[in-house]
């Protein structure tokens, strides 16, 4: 994907895509909110002390710079909310995570930012993404440390491949009980047809906030990668309505609940000998047959152990030590 041209973009989208979140700050400050920009691309909007106890919502986009649809969607949501700031019913942290990658029209610059939310980074410690993750960790900690017990994190993405379920979500399995039920129900209103319960950290932003801050967190995949300014936003209608309602303290009703899958196996690339039998263009949630070989890595062979298993995120091109795919199974299947 080539670097986007920002000159022709609508002003709200241009501001968000370039990390100029301060452009949205004035209406909220004028309405009496406590507003801050603790890092480039990060905006926090809090109610005054007299209105503490509101839910805390972290909304992140652009963790991968080529996943621009959610950036466009959130620009519209934030622009509309800034015109009626008193409708904001949550304490909000907005994060445009990888501004440099968005500007370059690339997924990342040195390494995948969504693998950097971990304490050990090995040979990636000096990458641009490691430094950016440190900034986001600090800003996120400061935000959630001042929030009440109801904490949400919606990390909005688009997928790089086709999917049997075009909109789906990954929820850390440690999000449990009523918090999980509420999140899964909300994801259904946002158009998610499937939810995967993830049991392995993997260095993702959403797992970090669930583990470290008790957030009901999710990585939400909203369709396919598209060029900035050229996304078909009709594909995001359900997610747009659900996010806009959440920020206003409202509920969208009438949505079908998503199917829920559990992660039964994580495929990790152990060496440069890794070879994946599943093609790069394999759609997410492609069914597998028992006994099929998914990948080999030296003496390690990843095989399908049961009928009813599906492959998600197959990617042999990740760095050694990172996830090259996951195998999932219906929780009620």
Image (spheres, helix red, strand yellow):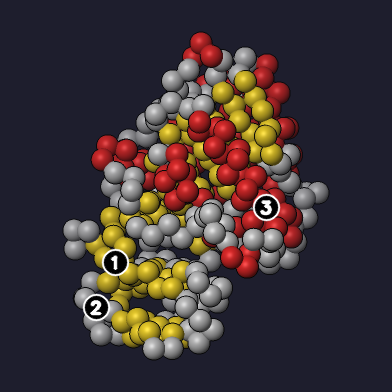
Residue 144 coordinates in the image, percent (x, y):
50, 33
* Residue 132 pos. (x, y %): 66, 51
Q: Quadrant of residue 284?
A: bottom left
Q: Earlier in the sequence, mark 2 or mark 3?
A: 3
Residue 43 x/y as whole percent: 64, 34
Residue 204's disc number:
none
Looking at the rendered image, the quarter that the C terminus falls into is bottom left
Q: Distance between the residues labelled 2 and 3?
A: 40 Å
- The alpha-carbon separation of the residues under discs 2 and 1 comes to 10 Å
* Residue drawn 60% across the image and 34% down it: 78
Nearer to us: label 2 or label 3: 3
Q: Give the CA distance from mark 1 to mark 3.
A: 32 Å
- Per the image, the residue denoted by label 1 is 264
Which residue is located at x 73 percent, y 32 percent? 23
Q: How crowded is mark 3: few (under 14 residues within 10 Å), some or many (20 or more)?
A: some
Q: How crowded is mark 1: few (under 14 residues within 10 Å), some or many (20 or more)?
A: some
Measured along the vertical axis of the image, is residue 251 above or below residue 181?
A: above
At x 31%, y 63%, the residue is 263
Precedes in sequence: disc 1 or disc 3: 3
Q: Name the one closer to the observer, 42 or 190.
A: 42
In the picture, measured across the screen, residue 65 lies left or right of residue 254, that is right
Q: Is residue 21 above or below residue 7?
A: above
Dot 2 corresponds to which residue? Answer: 305
Instruction: Looking at this view, name the residue that lies furthest to the top.
Output: 50
Q: State the residue at coordinates (57%, 33%).
A: 142
Looking at the rendered structure, the secondary structure element under dot 1 is strand
Q: Which of marks 1 and 3 is in front?
A: 3
Can you tell which quarter of the image residue 227 is in? Answer: bottom right
Mark 3, secondary structure of its residue: helix
What residue is disc 3 on?
Answer: 131
Count residues near mark 2 (Cα–Cα under 10 Å), then give few for <14, some for 14-19, many for 20+: some
In which quadrant of the rendered image does the N terminus lie?
bottom right
């Amino acid at each position: 994907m080539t670097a986007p041209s920002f000159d022709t973009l609508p002003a709200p989208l241009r501001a968000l895509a370039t990390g100029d979140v301060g452009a949205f700050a004035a209406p909220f400050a004028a309405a009496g909110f406590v507003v801050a920009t603790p890092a480039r691309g990060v905006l926090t909007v809090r109610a005054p002390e007299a209105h503490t106890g509101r839910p805390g919502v972290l909304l992140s986009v652009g963790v991968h710079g080529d996943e621009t649809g959610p950036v466009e969607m959130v620009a519209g949501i934030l622009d509309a909310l800034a015109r009626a700031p008193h409708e904001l019913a949550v304490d909000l942290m907005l994060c445009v995570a990888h501004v440099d990658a968005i500007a370059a029209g690339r997924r990342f610059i040195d390494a995948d930012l969504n693998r950097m939310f971990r304490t050990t980074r090995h040979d990636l410690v000096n990458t641009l993404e490691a430094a950016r993750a440190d900034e986001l960790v600090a800003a996120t900690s400061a935000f959630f440390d001042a929030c009440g017990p109801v904490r949400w994190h919606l990390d909005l993405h688009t997928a790089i491949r086709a999917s049997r379920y075009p909109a789906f979500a990954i929820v850390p399995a440690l999000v449990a009980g009523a918090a999980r039920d509420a999140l899964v129900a909300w994801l259904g209103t946002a158009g998610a047809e499937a939810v995967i319960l993830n049991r392995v950290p993997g260095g993702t932003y959403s797992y970090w906030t669930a583990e470290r801050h008790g957030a009901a967190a999710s990585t939400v995949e909203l369709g396919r990668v598209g060029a900035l300014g050229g996304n078909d936003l009709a594909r995001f209608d359900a997610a747009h309505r659900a996010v806009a309602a959440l920020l206003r303290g409202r509920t969208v009703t009438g949505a079908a609940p998503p199917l829920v899958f559990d992660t039964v196996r994580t495929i990790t690339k152990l060496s440069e000998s890794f070879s994946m039998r599943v093609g790069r263009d394999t759609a997410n949630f492609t069914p597998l047959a028992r006994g099929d070989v998914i990948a080999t890595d030296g003496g390690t062979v990843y095989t399908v152990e049961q009928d009813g298993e599906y492959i998600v995120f197959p990617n042999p091109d990740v760095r050694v030590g990172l996830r090259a795919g996951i195998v999932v199974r219906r929780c009620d299947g």
